[in-house]
Amino acid sequence: MTHATDLPGRPRPGALGGPATTRATCVLAPNPSAMTLQGTNTWILAEPDSDLAVVVDPGPLDEAHLGNVLATAEAAGKRVALTLLTHGHPDHCDGAARFAELTGTHVRALDPALRLGGEGLGVGDVVTTGGLELHVVATPGHTADSLCFHLPADRALLTGDTVLGHGTTIVAHPDGRLGDYLDSLRRLRALTVEEGVDTLLPGHGPVLDDAKGAIEYYLAHRAKRLAQVETAVENGHRTPSEVVAAVYADVDPRLWPAAELSVRAQLDYLDEHGLI
């Protein structure tokens, strides 16, 4: 895990909760931890002149948080009309069923097990609600079902756990795969060039204003870690826990169990490519 100051993207002061772009407002869930950073970012998206809103990642099953999301939307004159999920980790989706009850909305996700009352989400889908337009971008790697949402009108990208506002994310082996994750990062980098995306709205941590720089940092970080893992194996460290101790010595030991998931994914990647 790196620090936010190491990212080319500049964390925006005050972006932990509140308006982030013209169409996106963050409501921070009260679930801080070493893995969730300050907490899960629940995003309310709406066109300024519309009374309909889309909520991305209701977050944990916390009645006060879900009520706060609703109250924030209503204070802006919006009615929540749709709920979307970036992926199926509990800190993003455990509150979705209850939120659907509170709002009467469908829940759309890539994983059929997470959908409620409506169609799912697929690669290339365009979600339109109250004039708002969101493009679904498949970004497997952190998990197999990870998605990002491109908000063209704000030149922004909601990244879930694929890119964080602080540090770097894990590849959650065995569901997450490093090769998929690298391909996803390259896909997001292409959006910064081809579609002009310049702002990242992450699932944890503050907004990043240098989207291309942050994604390129992630790619460089992964290449560096992969080389370190390969070297550790060459030096006789065979088990994932041994590799973690050798490669992640600069990381808070509380994060070593999560780092081990990424190491397992890296070892699989190296084995698949005949590098170990």
Image (cartoon, helix red, strand yellow):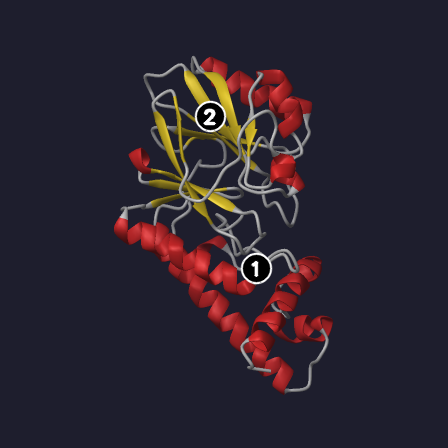
**Crowd class of label 1 (few under 14; some 14 to 19; many from 20; radius 10 Å):** some
Percent of width and height locating residue 220: 43, 67
**Disc number placed over residue 168 in the picture, else none:** none
- Frontmost residue, 152 versus 137: 137
Quarter of the image with the C terminus is: bottom right
Q: Nearer the viewer, mark 2 or mark 1?
A: 2
Instruction: Look at the image and tell me whether residue 159 can be seen.
Output: no
Residue in the image at 62% along x and 73% along y: 267
Q: Does the CB distance between marks 2 and 1 fall below 8 Å?
A: no
Residue in the image at 68% along x and 86% along y: 236
- The answer to whether 152 appears left or right of 220 in the picture is left
- List the residue tagged with mark 1: 1
- The answer to whether 223 appears left or right of 197 in the picture is right
Q: Is residue 20 above or below residue 37?
A: above
Q: Secondary structure at mark 2?
A: strand
Percent of width and height locating residue 249: 64, 70
Task: Residue lying at the far bottom in this picture: please name it.
Answer: 235
Percent of width and height locating residue 275: 55, 82
- List the residue tagged with mark 2: 54
Q: Of the residues under marks 2 and 1, which one precedes in the sequence? A: 1
Disc 1 residue type? Answer: Met
Q: Is residue 106 above or below residue 258?
A: above
- Frontmost residue, 152 versus 32: 152
Instruction: Look at the image and tell me whether residue 273 can be seen.
Output: yes
Disc 2 residue type? Answer: Val
Residue in the image at 67% along x and 58% along y: 258
